[in-house]
Structures are given as C-alpha cells and as structure tokens.
Amino acid sequence: MKVDILDAHDRFTYLHADKHHASIGECCQNIIDQRPFGSHDFYIFAHKREIGLDERVAMFAELYAQGKVISIDQVPSHRILWQPRLTKPKAQTNSMLFKAYVGTDQVKVIWIIPEREMWEQYKKGNITESKVIVESIHDFEHNRAKLEAKEDDDLPDEVIDNIYRAMATHAKQQKSAASSSAS
C-alpha cells in the first residue's frame, strides 16, 4: 500500500531524532508495512505532543555527542505521535486521521486539522488553500460528530474487542516467555 504525498500533507516538522526528515507518506507507509492488525483495515492517527524537558535534555546530550547540535534550542520541543487504531479517536486540533486499506494502495484522508493559529492560511483564495483542511476545520467547528462517526466499512465493535483481546493475550505471552528465558 502506498501513500500519495499530495493527498497527505501538512506543515508539521517531524521531530524524532533520527527520523526528522520523514514525510507524512513515509510515516504512514511504515505503519502500513507493519500490518498492526493483520489483514484488517485500520486508522492512522497522528497528533502533535510536547516533549518534556527531561527528554529534551536527554536528546540534547545524545545529539550533542554526535555533533548534530550545539544548543538545546536546536532540540525539538514537540513530536508527532503516529498511532494505528481500529476505531476513530475524538477529533482534535493539531491532528491528522487517515484510513489505510490493507492489501490495496488506498489511504483515505479522514481529516487534517492544523493548530487554530494556522487556520486562516488554508482558507479559500489563499495560496496555501487546502480543500481537505478547510472541510476538516469546518466540520470540526460545526459538525464534529461527522468527523467522529463510524465509517460504513468499520469493523463491528465485537470484532474490534476480540482483536484487541487477542493482541493483549499475545503480548502477555511474549512478556512471560521473555521473563522465563531471562531467568
């Protein structure tokens, strides 16, 4: 499955120390390639979060030792978290939601909602106008339920619960096996 960079874009900077040049398409493709839910279609939720000071200091020490930075001001203060999900999250600013269709090259953009301070730049008539972002912002302000509603092709809740239960059981078994072999 391939993600078309022109269908999935925003102005976020990718902030993980060794992936700071990754594009939205590359991040989505990486998650898709992992097939986190096997053959089931899934959502990819990306949202911006602040990096705590302790983590920034640790990143600075590592990057400084590598000669990549000379000041803590060069260390990112935020990161984009990428989360595969079987259900839609609540819509929020500074987030993107895509739906990946496993076994195809299709990725559907559900929403791209930038920071509120940036909303004006995407409006109709601006050089940076984006139909997807304008529609996402409009729905976020006036019809959030539409953004958060189940899609027609979503899995039933019972199937989702069974998938998550099986994943939890598998993770516990792996943890037990790892602790047994360490003993």
Image (spheres, grey):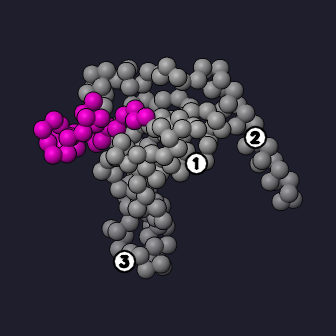
On the image, numbered disc 3 is attached to which residue?
70
In the image, 120 versus 72, the foreground residue is 120
Q: In the rendered structure, does residue 183 fall within the stretch colored magenta?
A: no
Kind of residue indicated by mark 3: Ile
Q: Quadrant of the C terminus?
A: bottom right
Q: In the rendered structure, does residue 126 fall within the stretch colored magenta?
A: yes
Residue 138 figure quarter: top left
Does residue 182 appear to the left or right of 67 in the view shown?
right
At which x and y percent is residue 146?
37, 21
Kind of residue indicated by mark 1: Asp
Marks 2 and 3, Cα distance to the nearest angstrom?
Answer: 44 Å
Marks 1 and 2, Cα distance to the nearest angstrom?
Answer: 20 Å
Q: Earlier in the sequence, mark 1 or mark 2?
A: 1
Q: Residue at x 77, y 48 (%)?
A: 175
The region drawn magenta spans 108-135
Q: Residue at x 41, y 50 (%)?
A: 24
On the image, numbered disc 2 is attached to which residue?
170
On the image, numbered disc 1 is attached to which residue?
33
Kind of residue indicated by mark 2: His
From where the camera sits, is residue 120 visible? yes
Q: Residue at x 25, y 35 (%)?
A: 131
At which x and y percent is residue 162?
69, 26
Does residue 41 appear to the left or right of 92 in the view shown?
right
Q: Dot 3, how many residues are within 10 Å of its Cα: few (below 14), some (14-19), or many (20+)?
A: few
Q: Which mark is residue 152?
A: none
Q: Which of the two marks, 2 or 3, is nearer to us in this view?
A: 2
Q: Earlier in the sequence, mark 3 or mark 1?
A: 1
Q: Which of the two marks, 3 or 1, is nearer to us in this view?
A: 1
Residue at disc 2, secondary structure: helix
At which x and y percent is residue 151?
47, 22
Looking at the image, is 157 positioned above or below residue 136? above
